[in-house]
């Protein structure tokens, strides 16, 4: 059987095994506000929480 002449370091081994690639996050545009946001996530815009183009909740104003 073939044997390596030298031990391969953990770092070198892990670099070879990795398939991770850094990618930019995908963004969606809200049809109501025109804001960019993460898809399938609610987002705040001007004191209102939007999800799928509809207002889900409004921020309370404490006096």
Image (spheres, rainbow, N blue to C red):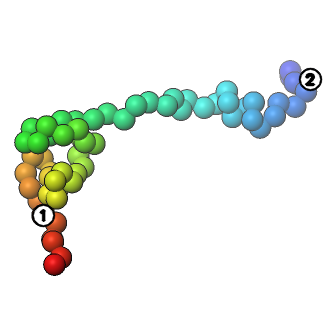
Measured Cα–Cα span from mark 2 to mark 1:
67 Å
The quadrant in which the N terminus is found is top right
Which numbered disc flags the more N-terminal residue, 2 or 1?
Answer: 2
Taking 32 as reference, is 16 left or right?
Answer: right
Taking 46 as reference, is 41 left or right?
Answer: right
Q: Which residue is mark 1?
A: 58
Query: 3 or 1: which is nearer to us?
Result: 3
The quadrant in which the C terminus is found is bottom left
Q: Residue at x 91, y 27 (%)?
A: 6
Asked if residue 40 is positioned above or below residue 61 in the image, the reply reads: above
Query: 61 or 54: which is nearer to us?
Result: 61
Q: Residue furthest top?
A: 2
- Describe the element under mark 2 as helix, strand or loop: loop
Would you identify the image quadrant in which residue 26 lies? Answer: top left
Q: Residue furthest right?
A: 5
Image coordinates of residue 12 in percent, x first then y, are 75, 30
Mark 2 or mark 1: which is in front? 1
Tags 2 and 1 touching, CB below 8 Å: no
Number of residues whose C-alpha sits closer than 10 Å to that of mark 1, classed few (under 14), some (14–19) or many (20 or more): few
Q: Residue at x 7, y 42 (%)?
A: 32
Number of residues whose C-alpha sits closer than 10 Å to that of mark 2, classed few (under 14), some (14–19) or many (20 or more): few
Taking 41 as reference, is 31 left or right?
Answer: left
Asked if residue 44 is positioned above or below residue 38 in the image, the reply reads: below
Query: 61 or 18: which is nearer to us?
Result: 61
Q: Which residue is mark 2?
A: 5
Image coordinates of residue 49 in percent, x first then y, are 16, 57
Q: Residue at x 18, y 40 (%)?
A: 35
Q: Residue at x 15, y 71 (%)?
A: 60
Query: 1 or 37: which is nearer to us?
Result: 37
Q: Residue furthest front?
A: 63
- Describe the element under mark 1 as helix, strand or loop: strand
Taking 29 as reference, is 5 left or right?
Answer: right
């Amino acid at each position: 059987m073939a044997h390596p002449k030298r031990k391969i370091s953990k770092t070198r081994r892990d670099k070879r095994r990795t398939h991770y690639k850094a990618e930019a996050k995908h963004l969606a545009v809200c049809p109501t506000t025109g804001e960019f946001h993460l898809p399938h996530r609610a987002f705040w815009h001007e004191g209102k929480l939007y999800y799928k183009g509809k207002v889900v909740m409004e921020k309370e104003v404490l006096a």
